[in-house]
Amino acid sequence: MTGRKSFGRTAIAAAVAAISLVVSGCSVEPNAPDMVRFQAGVAQGRQADAKAQEAGKVDCRVAKCIALTFDGGPGKDTPQLLDTLKREKVPATFFLLGNKHVTRYPDVVRRMSREGHEVANHTWTHRILINFSEAEVRDELARTQKAIKEVTGRAPTLMRPPQGRTNPMVTGVARDLGLSLVLWDNTARDYSTTDSALIESRVLYQAKRDGIILLHDIYDGTVPAVPGILAKLRKRGFTFVTVPQMIAPAVPQPGQVFRPTY
């Protein structure tokens, strides 16, 4: 068996496990971006075209879209990443940690917002939310909401639960705070390697239309891998968008869970 096939099967198994963690024993129903987009288009009729253009400038009902997302930052390498994204004119979605990240790098967070990236919530201290009380979950999310709003002037509308683990209590708190939940279908497991070439190949192998790529701008191998990822996915015809741009003309609804189909 080739290494590529082996990774593919491993990735599928991991994806199935992640889905089980998210939805097992509860009523949380992930929504695929393409289906949400389609339903909004049907409901809105001719107005959908104008709203899609207004919201994202890219119509992912036509374009071959993919969303680049980064968790756990900002970190020391995030300015270099922002330089790359600015040069390549690529918008991304950043799920930020509050404690020692937003609070340590407010100028970087401000730059993200100013340069058109989606700034989102990844909790205050990266706790696995399903293991804590409702009050503790609310504190983890609300503190980060407040910190980001103080820096950018706008509270996030998206969050990503650490490890993708959620349940009805977590989604309920997110709903109260005006947050949609965003999962993923493409991960390079960059927390386990500093090999930028390996990170790149893992992302490329899993890339598909309406996919959501999970990377971390806090690990040494990740930011150097981004230029190659961008160049090679563009050669395949992909257009990079933020998560809200991907689902336009729909808009994220509080408590809604987004995950591409596998």
Image (tube, rainbow, N blue to C red):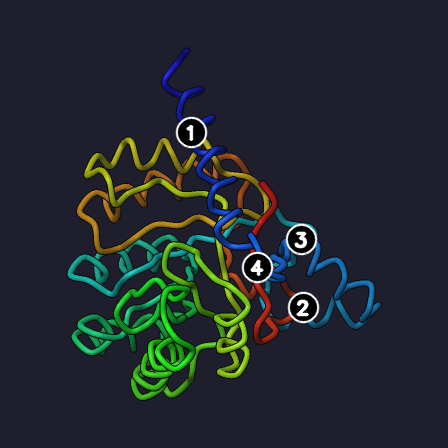
Please indicate whether residue 94 sits to the left or right of residue 176 in the image.
Answer: left
Q: On the image, numbered disc 2 is attached to which residue?
A: 250
Q: Position of residue 52 (x, y in %)?
A: 67, 67
Q: Amino acid at mark 3?
A: Asp
**Dots 4 and 3: beta carbons under 8 Å?**
no
Please indicate whether residue 84 sits to the left or right of residue 25 in the image.
Answer: left
Q: Amino acid at mark 4?
A: Phe
Which quadrant would the C terminus be assigned to in this image?
Answer: top right
Which structural element holds mark 1? helix
Which structural element holds mark 2? loop
Q: Position of residue 80 (x, y in %)?
A: 21, 57
In this rendering, the answer to whether 188 lies above or below 5 is below
User: Whole-Å distance between the Cαs marked 1 and 2?
Assistant: 33 Å
**Dots 1 and 3: beta carbons under 8 Å?**
no
Label 2 vs 4, first from the N-terminus: 2
Which structural element holds mark 3? helix
**Dots 2 and 3: beta carbons under 8 Å?**
no
Dot label at residue 10: 1
- From the image, state whether disc 4 or disc 1 is nearer to you: 1
Q: On the image, numbered disc 4 is attached to which residue?
A: 258
